[in-house]
Amino acid sequence: MNSVGLTRNLPLKLLALLLALVVFAHVQTEKEQEKEFRVSLHLVGLPESLILGGGSPRHVAVRIRGKGKQLLKLKVQPPEVLVDLREAHPGVVQRMLSATDVVVPVGTKVAVAEVLEPRMVEITVDTLILKSLPVHAVWAGRPATAFAVAGPLEVAPAAVPVLGPARVLGDLASLATLPFDLGDARGDAWNEVLLDLPSGVRGVQSEAVRIRVPLVPASNRIFSSVPVRLEGLQTGWVAHLEPTVVEVLLAGPGPLLGSVPPESLRVLVLLEGREPGRYGLAPEVQVPFEPQLRLLRIRPSRVSVHLVAPDAGGRRTGN
């Protein structure tokens, strides 16, 4: 057959092919079929005095029977599973799912064959309570170098009302803010910070508070001859430390710096987990009254530690 034969009466041939496809599609959409759908699960009717504790699935697999064109409609308007919780009480609610829980769009002529997975849901229900809790500010970072924190961070309001599950709020004594970076503090300005609310808890009026950081010009003070302490030295081991004292430079509000006793500073060298031998280690300084005081410098920045452990005969090893 040559190309002329293939193209002869081409419009009629294309029309016939189109009609065949239309007939085929019509037959398929009129044919009774079963298909699996993954539909949303919705919990409805929960009394206002209760709250959901989570744990229920978000989707359910179901098998639906109907003509092809009716099943195609469900792609645009999907069915959903509704679980009625009007009779629920605090605790764990177990509910078997059935075809009667599946709601299909009005006017769709299909039948729900069965619920596939999950067949049963477990829903945690708790009593919803209202509680007013004090708020404390959580800070991070340091203020600008020229400034120091003169006192506790102020929070307004000092307490906020929240709603949440009794199991969460029952033993909760206070709320914290999300960490506020002290480097963002400017003068006596107030800054809005979100509360770090537990899961399921929400604010009644707001979920944020204002924080003010009292800043003053920073002063410096040198603490000389602060002893270096060894932490984590194993029993029977010997540590040779050089030097045994360091110089610490702190910054902060002048009156507070002047009242700090030198013995309140702790300079630690952590030895836990180390093998015998010689080390150059950076001491860790525990500064009192943070964040009002901050460490500017320790001199020297590293100390030498020689660890010696006893051997099986009682002699020392680690030279």
Image (tube, grey):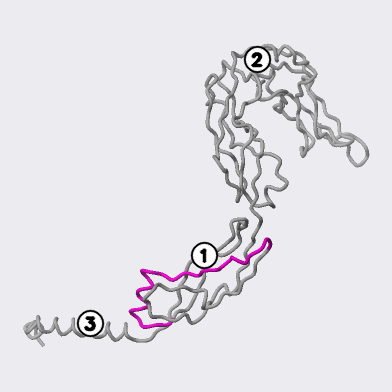
Vertical side of 49 occupied by 136: above or below = above
List the residue tagged with mark 3: 22
Q: Nearer the viewer, residue 287 or 225?
A: 287
**Residue 233 at x, y percent in the picture:** 83, 34
Judged from the image, the secondary structure of the residue bearing numbered disc 2 is loop
User: Which residue lies at the image location 93% right of the left edge and 37% below the top edge?
Assistant: 314
List the residue tagged with mark 2: 253
Mark pair 2, 3: CA separation:
86 Å
Q: Residues within 10 Å of mark 2 (few under 14, many from 20)?
A: many
Instruction: Give amino acid for label 3.
Output: Val
Instruction: Give amino acid for label 1.
Output: His
Q: Residues within 10 Å of mark 3 (few under 14, many from 20)?
A: few
Q: Nearer the viewer, mark 1 or mark 2?
A: 1
Q: Nearer the viewer, residue 114 or 202?
A: 202
Which label belongs to residue 313?
none
Mark pair 1, 3: CA separation:
39 Å
Which label belongs to residue 42?
1
**Residue 199 at x, y percent in the picture:** 61, 50
